[in-house]
Amino acid sequence: MSALLLVCVLLVLSKTKAIEVQSWTPCTDLRPLDMLSEVFSSPGNTFNKVRMVQSQGARGFRLSVFPHVLSFPSTRLFHNCHLFPEEFSIIITLKVPNIPSKKNEYLFTMVTERSKHVLLGIRYSENKLHFLFWSPEHYNGLKTKVTFRGILLADNQWHTLVLAVSGNSVSLTIDCSVPVEIVLDKPFPVSLNTTGSSIYVGSRRRRKGFFSGLMRQLVLLPGSDATTTICPNARPRLAELSIPEVLKELPVKTEDSEVHLMYPFAALPKEADMKVTLGQQPPCTDSEMSQFWIDTSLKGLFLCNGVKWITVLERKERLDYVEEYQNLATTSETMGLEIFHIPGVGHFAVMANRNNQPGSVLYKWSDGKFKVHQYFITYQAQAWKHFTIGKRIFLALANFEKNDDGEELSIIYKWNPKKGKFLQYQKIRTYSARDWEAFQIDGDTFLAVANHREGNNHNINSVIYKWNSTTGLFEINQTIPTSGAYDWEFFSIGPYSFLVVANTFNGTSTNIQSHIYIFLGDTFRPFQSIMTFGASDWEFFRIQDRFFLVVANSHNYNIGAGTQELKNSYVINSTIYELNITGQVFVKFQDILTYSAVDWEFFTVGEDYFLVVANSFDGSSFAVNSVIYRWQGYEGFVAVHYLPTYGCRDWEAFNTSSGSFLMYSSAKEPIARVLKLKTL
Ligand SMILES: *[C@@H]1O[C@H](CO)[C@@H](O)[C@H](O)[C@H]1NC(C)=O
Ligand SMILES: *[C@@H]1O[C@H](CO)[C@@H](O)[C@H](O)[C@H]1NC(C)=O
Ligand SMILES: *[C@@H]1O[C@H](CO)[C@@H](O)[C@H](O)[C@H]1NC(C)=O
Ligand SMILES: *[C@@H]1O[C@H](CO)[C@@H](O)[C@H](O)[C@H]1NC(C)=O
Ligand SMILES: *[C@@H]1O[C@H](CO)[C@@H](O)[C@H](O)[C@H]1NC(C)=O
Ligand SMILES: *[C@@H]1O[C@H](CO)[C@@H](O)[C@H](O)[C@H]1NC(C)=O
Ligand SMILES: *[C@@H]1O[C@H](CO)[C@@H](O)[C@H](O)[C@H]1NC(C)=O
Ligand SMILES: [Ca+2]
Ligand SMILES: [Ca+2]
Ligand SMILES: [Ca+2]
C-alpha cells in the first residue's frame, strides 16, 4: 500500500468515526444565537401587537402579546442534537420602568410542551434575579434556583446582563461592571435534554409573570462567556453581541445636528411609540401612515407613507444613509467637478465655474472640509480632468467660450510643488469644449477633448492628443467626427482599450448614435454604435467579472420627419449596457427612468456596488431628486436613496481618512454639497 493510499484510508476512517460518535459534534454552532430575532422570524407566528419603542436613544420591543405567540421550538437553536450546552452565557438588554414588590417577571424560559416543565429560565423581581434550571437527578419538576440578590433592574434605564455558566460557577455581569459569582453544589447538568421543548420570550408560557419592559437583546452564546467579547464597552448599558437588525439605530433626524435624510423620518416622534406590524404585508393607506412593518422573512423594515411601503432597512444593507456634511458656497454656478489626491499633499476638489471672475476654484481638504486653495480665470469652464505622467501632475481644463482676446483655448495646468499651485502649461485650440479624458495605452499618455460645436455647427471633429516626451507637449494624434460631443470615457477590458463618446445633438435631433471605439493597431476604430437621447455622460464600471457601460440621456428632442411632430422630453430612460463577452457587443441590461440625467457615478461601499445619477431637470423645475441605486444581483440596480438636488450637474465619490463621501455640483445655484456616507 502506497503512503498516499494509506493517508486516504485513514481520512475515510476518521470521517466515518466522527459521524458515528454523535457527541463529538456540538449541538449548536458556537456562535451567538439571537433568540429575539428567532422569535420574530418563526414561521406561523402572527403578530399585530408588538410595538417597537425608541427610548433613551435605543430601541426595544414591547412584548404585549399572548405568551404562546412569542415562542419557538428549541430545535431551531439545537439542530444537531438536543442537549443544552454545558457551558454558555445569556446576554439580555432590557429596560423596565418599575415592578410591584413581590411580583416576578420572566425574561425567557425553555419549557417542555408536554409536561410544561421549565427546563431553564431567568426571572427577576424588585431586587433579585433568579436563574432556574432543571436537574436530571430530580424527576418531579424540581429545579435548581440560583438567586442573585440586591439586583435593581426596574429603574427605567437600559441594562445589559450577561449570565455565564461554566461547571459549578454561575456569574452575573451587569452593564460590564464587576461580575458577581455564585458557586453551585453540583455543576450545571452536562446533559440537559431539550427534546420537545420550546423557548418562550418574556414569559413562562403563562400570562402570569409576563415581562412588562422593553427588550432589545436576548442571546444565547454556547461555549463561552460573552463578557470577554462585549466588555469593556463605550455604552455598557447597551453592550451588544447581537440584536435584531430592525432595532439598530435608525436614521431619525435629530433637531440639533445637520443630519439630512432622504426619507420622511423628520416627522416621526423620537421618544414615542411607533406602531409596528409583523408578518405578511399589511395594507398601507392613510390610516397606516407612519407605521412600520417588519417583513420577518426578508428581515426588512418598511415605513408606510400613506400610499406604499418604503424600504427603511434591509438586513444586508451596509450603506445606511447619506447625511449632509458640507455646503460649499461656490462663487458661481458650477459644471464639472473633479476630485483627486496629490500624494504627500492632500485631497483636492476642482470645480468648473460658470463665471470668469474670480473664475474656477481649486479647494483643498483640510480639517475635514474643502477650503479655497487657488483661483483660475476660466471662460464658462465645463470640466476638469486630473492626470499624471510619471511624477508630473496635471489638470486639463475645458473652456466653452472665447477668452478676452477672442481666442478659444482650453488649458493644461501643471502642479508646481514648490509653489503648491497649478501653473499654466499648454494651451490647446478647442471648440466649445465640454470634457477632457486622459488615459494611457502602452505607456503613452493621451488626452481626448470633446468639441461640442463650432458656431452653430455641432457636427465637427473631436481630437485625441498624444504626449510627446521629447517636446513635453501634447500633439494631435487622431481626429474623430462627433455631434455635439459632451463626454469621453476611456476604459480597458483585458488587453483592449476603448473610448466612448456621448453625442448630444446633430443640429436637428438629440436621438442620435453615440459611438464606442476600440484601439487597434495605432488608432481608435469604430466598435459599436448605440442610440442615445441627448447623451451627456458615459460611465464604465465592472462588477466582479462583468463589464457595464451606462449612458446619461438628458433630452429627447426630435422633429419627426414628415409629421413635423415635436418630441421634447426630459423624463426619459437612461440605459445600462453589459458587455456580452462572446458576442463582443454591449447589450441593454437595464433602463432607469431619469430626469435630464447629466452624470452617472459608480462607487462601492464595503462589498456593495452603487450608482448615483445626476438628475437635473424634469421639464419645468430644476428641483429634482438625484438617486442612489444599489446593485442587487439579478434584480440589477434598485433605488435606495433619493437626494434632493437643484440643477445637479456632476457627482464624484471620494474617500478620506475620515470616511467615504459624495459631492455634487449645481449648474443652477452657487452651492456644491458634500455628503457623508453613513455605514452600518
Ligand atoms: C432526549 O429525550 C428524548 C425524549 O425523551 C429521547 O428520545 C432522547 O434520546 C433524549 N436525548 C438524549 C441525548 O438523551
Ligand atoms: C516629438 O517631437 C519631436 C520634435 O518636434 C519630433 O521630432 C518627434 O517626431 C515627435 N515624436 C513623435 C512620436 O511624434
Ligand atoms: C498615434 O499614436 C499611436 C500610438 O502611440 C501611434 O502609433 C500613431 O503613429 C500616432 N498617430 C499619429 C497620426 O500621430
Ligand atoms: C440628425 O439625426 C436625425 C435622427 O437621427 C436625422 O434624421 C437627421 O438627418 C440628422 N441631422 C443631421 C444634420 O445630421
Ligand atoms: C423606460 O424603460 C422601461 C423598461 O424598458 C419602459 O417600460 C418604459 O416605458 C420606458 N419609459 C420611457 C419614458 O421611455
Ligand atoms: C452573447 O452573444 C452570443 C453570441 O452572439 C449569444 O449566443 C449569447 O446568447 C449571448 N449571451 C447573452 C447572455 O446574451
Ligand atoms: C472608499 O472606501 C470604501 C470603504 O472602505 C471602499 O469600499 C471603496 O472602494 C473606496 N472608494 C474609493 C473611490 O477609493
Ligand atoms: Ca469623461
Ligand atoms: Ca460620470
Ligand atoms: Ca462625475
Image (cartoon, rainbow, N blue to C red):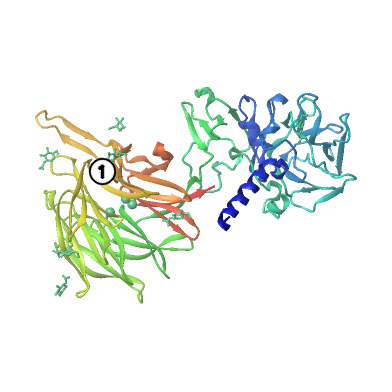
Image quadrant where residue 380 sits: bottom left
Q: Position of residue 243 (x, y in %)?
A: 64, 41
Furthest toward the bottom, the residue is 418
Q: In front: 650, or 116?
A: 116
Furthest toward the left, the residue is 562
Q: Quadrant of ligand 1?
A: top right
Disc 1 element: loop
Image quadrant where residue 16 sits: top right
Furthest toward the front, the residue is 1
Which residue sits at x=43%, y=50%? 604
Name the residue beneath numbered marker 1: 583
Which residue sits at x=70%, y=55%? 232
Q: In front: 577, or 345?
A: 577
Q: For residue 510, say whether it is visible.
A: no
Q: Is residue 94 left or right of residue 466?
A: right
Name above or below for residue 415 compared with residue 617.
below
Q: Position of residue 145 (x, y in %)?
A: 87, 38
Q: Position of residue 278 (x, y in %)?
A: 59, 28
Furthest toward the right, the residue is 185
Q: Is mark 1 within 8 Å of ligand 6?
A: yes
Q: In front: 23, or 371?
A: 23
Q: Could you tell me the amino acid type at mark 1? A: Gly
